[in-house]
Image: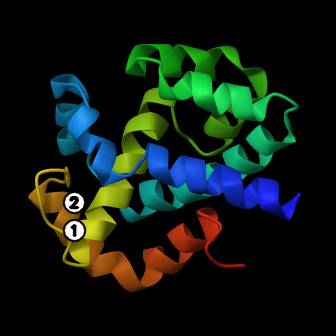
Amino acid sequence: MQVRIRLLCLVLCIAASPALAQNLSPQQRQAILDYQLTLPIAEHLITAMQEMTKYLISLPDYQARMKKSATMTGADRIAQLEKDPKAAAILKQNSLTARDYLTGVPALRMALMAAQGATGPNIVASPANVAFGKANLAQLKPKMDTADGLRR
């Protein structure tokens, strides 16, 4: 089970990595740039990530779902989350919409990466979110690492 968790976390990390930011549509890039991070939103995103990961790996077809999700459009991924009662409940418990989650997680991840000095065309972060990341890096980075399965 531990191997499955790490595999899923790796897949989730890769799916939201800035290396794939070059594959974002112009609309997705703009949505990430427009997304305004705050500490309460970041906390909700991280908590939802942890809960969503636990839920997804509990599904017998989680690997197939991850592969399928990687090929879906942003609108299709939003619809998929909204149609899944458990996923929708996780988002609702964390005061997030599917759009918030699917845009906010990469926005938060890339803001924290930029706050650590990562630069380049594949880092999509607004100046305000980079400033937010710098101001909250010490608090949020360990939580993101835990959510990504990098820490226990």
- Determine whether the residue tagged by mark 2 lies in a helix, strand or loop: helix
Residue at the spot 79% in from the left edge and 44% down from the top edge: 57
Residue at the spot 19% in from the left edge and 51% down from the top edge: 122
Q: Is residue 61 above or below residue 43?
A: above
Q: Is residue 49 above or below residue 79?
A: below
Where does residue 130 sit, x and y in percent of width and height? 19, 66
**What residue does disc 1 label?**
114
Residues at marks 2 and 1 touching, judged by CB atoms closer than 8 Å? yes
Answer with the quarter of the image where residue 66 lies.
top right
Quadrant holding the C terminus: bottom right
Residue 107 relative to residue 53: left or right: left
Answer with the quarter of the image where residue 34 lies.
top left
**129, 14: nearer the viewer:** 14
Residue 11 relative to residue 1: left or right: left
Q: Marks 2/1: CA distance? A: 9 Å
**What residue does disc 2 label?**
129
